[in-house]
Image (cartoon, rainbow, N blue to C red):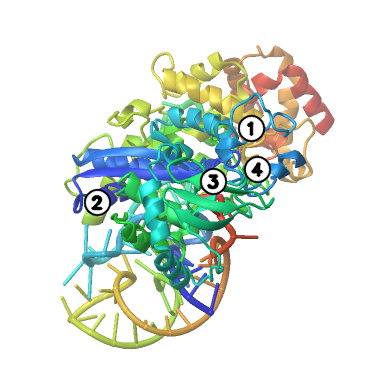
RNA sequence: GGGCCUGUAGCUUAGUCAGGUAGAGCGACGGGCUUUUAACCCGUCGGCCGCGGGUUCGAAUCCCGUCAGGCCCGCCA
C-alpha cells in the first residue's frame, strides 16, 4: 500500500471527515523543499478521498510570523521591520528595498508559489494566518492560553527542556512601531493585553484583532483546534524530541481540542550539498524545476519516496533516473493483473500504482495518459543531436517509439528537454561533446585497421550526399570496401568524434556537424 | 547531551509497520534486430540483507547490543 493511503486508512479509524494541512512561513523564495511539505499533506488528502472519506486540504500561510532578520536579498532598510509580521511589511523591489506601493512581503513570495502549485495540480484552501487573527478566530485560544499560562510554561519547559524567562507571556503583542520585539506585557484584561514596547511607549492589543500573535509553539497548537486539523505532516525540524510537535500535542489538548497524530517527513537535500537553505544559496525553486520536467514527474519525486526517507534531489542524473522510472512504471502497470505474483511483488505493484495515481495533476486521471513512450535519456540524446524538432520526431518514428505525429506530452517534453540542455542544470555526463580534434585517448584506442577505414572515408567523403540516411549507407559501403568490420568502423568514428567507444547514432551526429567539420577533424587527426 | 533516519548486487534501491524460500532499475557481459553501436528486444553474471547476540519451526523483517554515515534540536519544510 502506498504511504498516503496507509496514512488515510489510519486517519479513517478516528474521523470520517478529515482536514489535512500544511503551513509555511513566506519569509523568502519558496524552494523545492516546500513542495514536499505541500505534497505530503495533499497526497494524504487525496488518499482520504480515494477511500471515501470527506476531506479538505488547507494551506496556512504564516503571514503573521515576524521578519527574523535582514536576509541577504533585502536591503539594510529592512532593519526597522524586524519583529513585524510579514503581512504588514512591504515587499522588496528589485534592489531589495521596501516597495511601498506594492504588495505585502507575504504575498510577494506567496503568489508565484501558488502559481507553481496550480501547475502541479494542488488547489488548497488558502488561509492567511494574519487574517485568522484579524477575524478574532484566535481570541478564544489566546484567552485560554493566557489564563493557563503557567500550565503551558510547564509543558514547554518540561518537554523541550528549555527554560522560559520569568516575564515570558503566551502572547506577543505588536508594539507602537509595528514590531513584536521587546514588547513587555504588563497586564491582561480581556480582550486587551496591555504592554510597554521597546521605545517605552505604552499601549494595548485587542486579542480579537491582528494586534499580536501567539508564540509559535502555541500558535501551532491553537490552529489545530481552530481549523479542526486531523493531519499535518511536519518537517523533521519540528519533529525532533522536545520539538514543537511534542509540545503542541499537550498544549492543543489543554486549549480544548484534539491534536492530529504526529507525522514527520524527512527533508529534501540537494545531492552533495546538504539541506536546502535560501540564505546559503543552496536552493532550487519549483518554477525552475517545472521548466525541466513535467509536473507529474515532480509529484512523482515526492510520491515515490516514503515520508521518513530523505530525498536526494538534483537536476542531473537522479532526476533523469526518476523520470525514466516513471515512464517504465507506466508501461509495467498497464494491467491490473496480479495473479502469479508473490506477496512482495503484489505489494510493490500496488504501491507503484498508488504512487502513479497520486502523481497525476488531476486526481482520478489515468496515469497512462501521461505516457510519453520515450525515455528522458533517449530524448536528451535526440534533442542534442537534432536541432530541429521535426528531425527528432522523424527519428522517433524510425525507431518505432511513435507511430504518427508526436502527442502533446512529447512536444512539451522536448521543449522542456531543450530548456534543460541549454540551462545550467543539465548533467555533465549526459552531454554529448563533439570534438574538433582527436583526443589523446582516442589515438590510443584506434588501431591501424580503423585508421585505414577513416582515411578511405575521408578520401571519398565528397561522394556522399549529406543526409543521415546516405551517411549511414556511406559508412557501410566504406566498411565493405575496406574489408573492415562494421563494428570496428563505428567504434573508430565514435572515438574520433566523441572520444568514447560508443554513442548515439553516429550518422545523425555526422549529419548535424556538417561535412566541413568532418573533413577538418579527420585532416587534423591523421 | 537528547532524538530521528539510513546501512540489502558495482551504483540507486523495493521488501521492514502485519516474520514464511531476497525483487527491480541502471551498469557490466553476451546475443538479436541480417542499415547502426547510449534506440528497441532477449538473456547472463552479480546479494554471509553493516556486525554480534536473542525470540521463533522459520528473521532483511521482531527484541537487545554494537559499528558506520546523514540529519534535526537557535521556530530555515
The answer to which of A242 and A339 lies nearer the viewer is A242
| Marks 3 & 1 on one chain | yes
What chain letter is assigned to the residue under label 3?
A
Which numbered dot is residue A177? 4
Q: Are marks 4 and 3 in contact (CB under 8 Å)?
A: no
Disc 1 or 4, which lies upstream in sequence? Answer: 1
Query: Disc 3 or disc 2, which is closer to the eye?
Result: 3
Which badge, 4 or 3, comes first in the chain's sequence?
3
> On the picture, is A255 further left or further right than A201?
left
Residue at screen point 46% across, 40% down? A209
Q: Are marks 4 and 2 in contact (CB under 8 Å)?
A: no
- Is residue A266 in sight in this rendering? no
CA gap, disc 4 to disc 2? 45 Å
Question: Is A164 in front, or is A400?
Answer: A164
As measured in the structure, the alpha-carbon distance from the residue carrying label 4 to the one carrying label 3 is: 16 Å
Which of the two marks, 4 or 3, is nearer to us in this view?
4
Residue A65, disc: 3
Query: What residue does disc 2 label?
Result: A11
Q: Which numbered disc covers residue A483? A: none
Q: Position of residue A326 (x, y in %)?
A: 40, 38
Cα gap from disc 3 to disc 1, whole angstroms: 15 Å
Amino acid at each position: 500500500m502506498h504511504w498516503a493511503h496507509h496514512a488515510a486508512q489510519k486517519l479513517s479509524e478516528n474521523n470520517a471527515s478529515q482536514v489535512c494541512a500544511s503551513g509555511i512561513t513566506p519569509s523568502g523564495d519558496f524552494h523545492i523543499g516546500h513542495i514536499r511539505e505541500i505534497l505530503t499533506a495533499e497526497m494524504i488528502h487525496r488518499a482520504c478521498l480515494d477511500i471515501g472519506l470527506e476531506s479538505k486540504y488547507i494551506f496556512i500561510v504564516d503571514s503573521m510570523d515576524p521578519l527574523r532578520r535582514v536576509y541577504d536579498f533585502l536591503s539594510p532598510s529592512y532593519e526597522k521591520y524586524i519583529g513585524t509580521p510579514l503581512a504588514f511589511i512591504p515587499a522588496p523591489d528589485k534592489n531589495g528595498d521596501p516597495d511601498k506601493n506594492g504588495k505585502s512581503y507575504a504575498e510577494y513570495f506567496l503568489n508565484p508559489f501558488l502559481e507553481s502549485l496550480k501547475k502541479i495540480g494542488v488547489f488548497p484552501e488558502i488561509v492567511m494566518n494574519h487574517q485568522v487573527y484579524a477575524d478574532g478566530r484566535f481570541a478564544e485560544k489566546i484567552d485560554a492560553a493566557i489564563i493557563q499560562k503557567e500550565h503551558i510554561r510547564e509543558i514547554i519547559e518540561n518537554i523541550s527542556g528549555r527554560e522560559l524567562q520569568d516575564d515570558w507571556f503566551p502572547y506577543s503583542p505588536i508594539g507602537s512601531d509595528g514590531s513584536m520585539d521587546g514588547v513587555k506585557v504588563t497586564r491582561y484584561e480581556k480582550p486587551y493585553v496591555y504592554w510597554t514596547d521597546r521605545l517605552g511607549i505604552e499601549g494595548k492589543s485587542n486579542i480579537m484583532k491582528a494586534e499580536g500573535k501567539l508564540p509559535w509553539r502555541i500558535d501551532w497548537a491553537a490552529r489545530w483546534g481552530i481549523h479542526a486539523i486531523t493531519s499535518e505532516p511536519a518537517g523533521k525540524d519540528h519533529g525532533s524530541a522536545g520539538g514543537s510537535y511534542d509540545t503542541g500535542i499537550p498544549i492543543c489538548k489543554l486549549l480544548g481540542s484534539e491534536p492530529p497524530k504526529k507525522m514527520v517527513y524527512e527533508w529534501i537535500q540537494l545531492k552533495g550539498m546538504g539541506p536546502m537553505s535560501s540564505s546559503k544559496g543552496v536552493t532550487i525553486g519549483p518554477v525552475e524545476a517545472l521548466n525541466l520536467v513535467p509536473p507529474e514527474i515532480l509529484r512523482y519525486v515526492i510520491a515515490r519516496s516514503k515520508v521518513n526517507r530523505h530525498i536526494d534531489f538534483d537536476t542531473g542524473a537522479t532526476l533523469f533516473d526518476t523520470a525514466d522510472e516513471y515512464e517504465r512504471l507506466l508501461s509495467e502497470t498497464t494491467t491490473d493483473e496480479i495473479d502469479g505474483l508473490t506477496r512482495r511483488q503484489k505489494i510493490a505493484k500496488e504501491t507503484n500504482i498508488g504512487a502513479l495515481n497520486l502523481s497525476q495533476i488531476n486526481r482520478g486521471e489515468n496515469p497512462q495518459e501521461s505516457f510519453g513512450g520515450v525515455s528522458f535519456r533517449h530524448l536528451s540524446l535526440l534533442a542534442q543531436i537534432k536541432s530541429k524538432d521535426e528531425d527528432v520526431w522523424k527519428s522517433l518514428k524510425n525507431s518505432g517509439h511513435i507511430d504518427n505525429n508526436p502527442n502533446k506530452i512529447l512536444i512539451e517534453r522536448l521543449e522542456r528537454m531543450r530548456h534543460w540542455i541549454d540551462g545550467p542544470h543539465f548533467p555533465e555526463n549526459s552531454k554529448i561533446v563533439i570534438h574538433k580534434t582527436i583526443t589523446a585517448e582516442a589515438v590510443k584506442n584506434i588501431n591501424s585497421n580503423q585508421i585505414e577505414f577513416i582515411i578511405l572515408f575521408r578520401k571519398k567523403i565528397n561522394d556522399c550526399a549529406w543526409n543521415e540516411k546516405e551517411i549511414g549507407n556511406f559508412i557501410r559501403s566504406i566498411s565493405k570496401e575496406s574489408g573492415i568490420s562494421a563494428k570496428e568502423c563505428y567504434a573508430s568514428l565514435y572515438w574520433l568524434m566523441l572520444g568514447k567507444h560508443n554513442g548515439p547514432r553516429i550518422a545523425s551526429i555526422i549529419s548535424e556537424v556538417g561535412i566541413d567539420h568532418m573533413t577538418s577533424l579527420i585532416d587534423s587527426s591523421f
